[in-house]
Amino acid sequence: MNSLAAKLDHLPVLPGFEHLRRFWDSTHNCPTVKVLPGEFYVSGHEEVVSTVLGSCVSACIYDPRRRLGGMNHFMLPAPSGEGARERDDWTCTVGRAARYGNDAMEQLINAILKAGGQRADLEVKIFGGGRVLAQMTDVGRRNIEFVQHYIETERLKLVAADVGDVYPRQVQFFPASGKVRVRQLKRAADAGVVAEEKQYLKRLANDPIKGEVELF
């Protein structure tokens, strides 16, 4: 067994998340887990949970008392109305929990509670929902409205948000501390990191957008 594999094995994943891609991040000196559209991940270890968002939204939910949390990545708010037409194109691509925010939020919260978190202590940070495809309906805005309504209805504590506008984002969540690092993808060269979402939202705008790293 090589040294990198040994480091990853030293921090095993919670049951149910073995299929997610993990690799050793030498910058942070810990594992990084890449969450693709439709996935979610929960951990209490010193590791990084990373994703890239265009019109999709991610919620990072954290229990500060027990120092564990997780991130999801969803593409549509719910399987109804206009979303029903869009989901037909993606039925063979991702599972139900992948596509819809109502499932993504419930499954993430339930996984955190199963890992020992307490609902009353949960803190939520939300990211994404950019209008990156000018020729399509504003899926990003619908995702934002959904997640804000969900948080209010479920009486969860929203502590930070970076949503809307017209640019994609790279998000890194640190589940042991609850911190989130967000980078606006402002260079044309950054368009490569949003390739996963191209499968669902056709294409992303590649115009350079100004932006810097922000911490939440």
Image (cartoon, grey):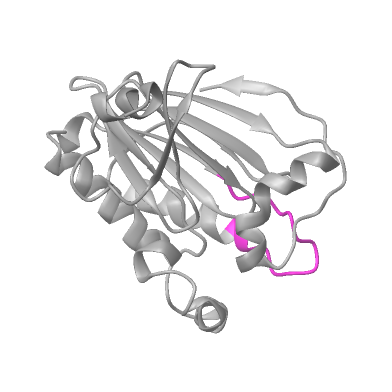
Q: Position of residue 13 (x, y in %)?
A: 25, 37
Residue 51 visible in the picture:
yes
Q: Nearer the viewer, residue 158 or 102?
A: 102
Q: Position of residue 37 (x, y in %)?
A: 50, 56
Identified at 37% across, 21% down, the residue is 3
Q: Nearer the viewer, residue 47 or 178?
A: 47
Which residues, given as a range, are shown in magenta? 128-141
Which of the 4 image quarters holds residue 66?
top left
Inspect the magenta stretch and tell me whether residue 108 lies in it: no
Q: Is residue 202 above or below residue 206?
A: below
| Quarter of the image that includes the N terminus | top left
Which of the 4 image quarters holds residue 119?
top left
Identified at 16% across, 41% down, the residue is 113
Residue 44 visible in the picture:
no
Q: Is residue 77 above or below residue 169?
A: below
Identified at 29% across, 39% down, the residue is 42
Q: Position of residue 181 (x, y in %)?
A: 54, 25
On the rendered structure, is 12 left or right of 23?
A: left
The chief SS type of the magenta part is loop
Q: Nearer the viewer, residue 140 or 200?
A: 200
Q: Position of residue 32 (x, y in %)?
A: 44, 31
On the rendered structure, is 89 left or right of 5?
A: right
Identified at 44% across, 59% down, the residue is 38
Extreme front residue here?
1
On the rendered structure, is 59 left or right of 26?
A: left
Q: Nearer the viewer, residue 114 or 19?
A: 19
Q: Is residue 213 above or below residue 78?
A: above
